[in-house]
Amino acid sequence: MPLIRHPSSEIADGSAMGANTKALKARIRSVDSTMHITKAMELVASSKMKRARSRMEGSRFYRTVLAEAFADLAASDSIYAKARPDLPVLYIVIAGDRGLAGGYNTNIFKTVMQSVTERDIVLPVGRRAADYFARRGFVPFDGKTYSADTITSSECVRLACEIKDRYDRGEFGAVYAVSTEFVSMLSQKAGIQKLLPLEKKGGEETVSSVATLYEPDAETVLAAIIPEYIAGTLYGAAAESFASELAARRSAMDTATKNASEMIDTLSLRYNRARQSAITQEITEIVAGAQM
């Protein structure tokens, strides 16, 4: 005798199966939409990368020249070469304006939080950095928000002059820049660079330091060009950080796109199986009804 199922149970099973296929289909559409977004963000990051790398490479040369020029000046008796550990520290933290860049912003914040204390002052560059330190109650440098992408050399010079003036007044005794070094398209490294007080590189005098004469003296020259040093370093660090952000975002979005594609394949397989199961069940029910 064929098994006779109650009509209500057939309706319930059919509706459950239909709901399952509908849910899978909606999920596939959602993941596909997300995949289009991640692919578009990857292409945008790739299109900006060439200009960002060109800007970064130009600033790297300038920063190298600055470091060599200040190597022997660090041995002077200027306040810019003397440690003042009893004063707060100014941290220039360069992060991104947006997320979806893998661990780019997180690595920066982890790096700086290992050194910063509650009494220190923070100059955030990037909206993510500004929001992060505002939530934690750190003293802002000037209350303004800057972007590593759009910051200009004139803004860097203005900030450098203000940093020098406040350093001269003793508001802080050291200046550090926290930024990301561009190693390759697949590797970016967060680190801290000490700007002030200056530290002499190595323990021996170089030929250039012995032969260089400063008029009227090294301390006066150093005080006059400190803003150029800070501005050049800040601009170069911002350029390198922005290139690192784009590389990190491109890599993260590429990974997200591949994961979304794999997820769509898995969901499509489940959808086809559920649909085939529903069709098989309907055929079985039709055959069973015909035999009654």
Image (tube, helix red, strand yellow):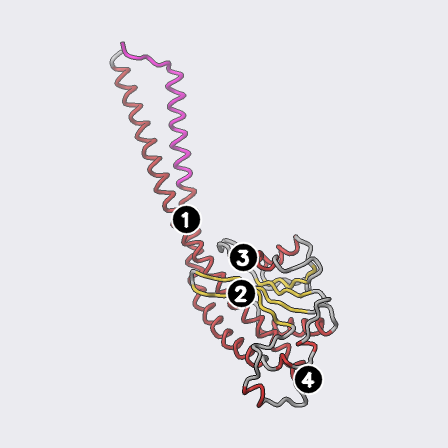
Residue 107, disc:
3
Which comes sooner in the sequence, label 1 or label 3? 1
Which comes sooner in the sequence, label 4 or label 3? 3
Q: Residues within 10 Å of mark 4 (few under 14, many from 20)?
A: few
Tag nearer the camera, 1 or 3: 3
| Residue in view at x 57 percent, y 77 percent | 201
Q: Is residue 286 left or right of residue 172?
A: left
* Label 2 with label 1: CB-CB less than 8 Å: no
Which comes sooner in the sequence, label 2 or label 3? 3
| Residue in view at x 60 percent, y 63 percent | 93
Residue 149, disc:
2
Residue 35, disc:
1
* Label 4 with label 3: CB-CB less than 8 Å: no
Q: Which residue is mark 4?
A: 220
Q: Amino acid at mark 1?
A: Met
**Quadrant (top left, top right, bottom left, bottom right) of the N terminus:** top left
Q: Is residue 156 left or right of residue 21?
A: right
Disc 4 to disc 2, C-alpha distance: 34 Å
User: What secondary structure predominates along the stretch shown in magenta?
Assistant: helix
226 to 119, vertically: above or below: below
Span colored in magenta = 1-28
Q: Is residue 194 magenta?
A: no
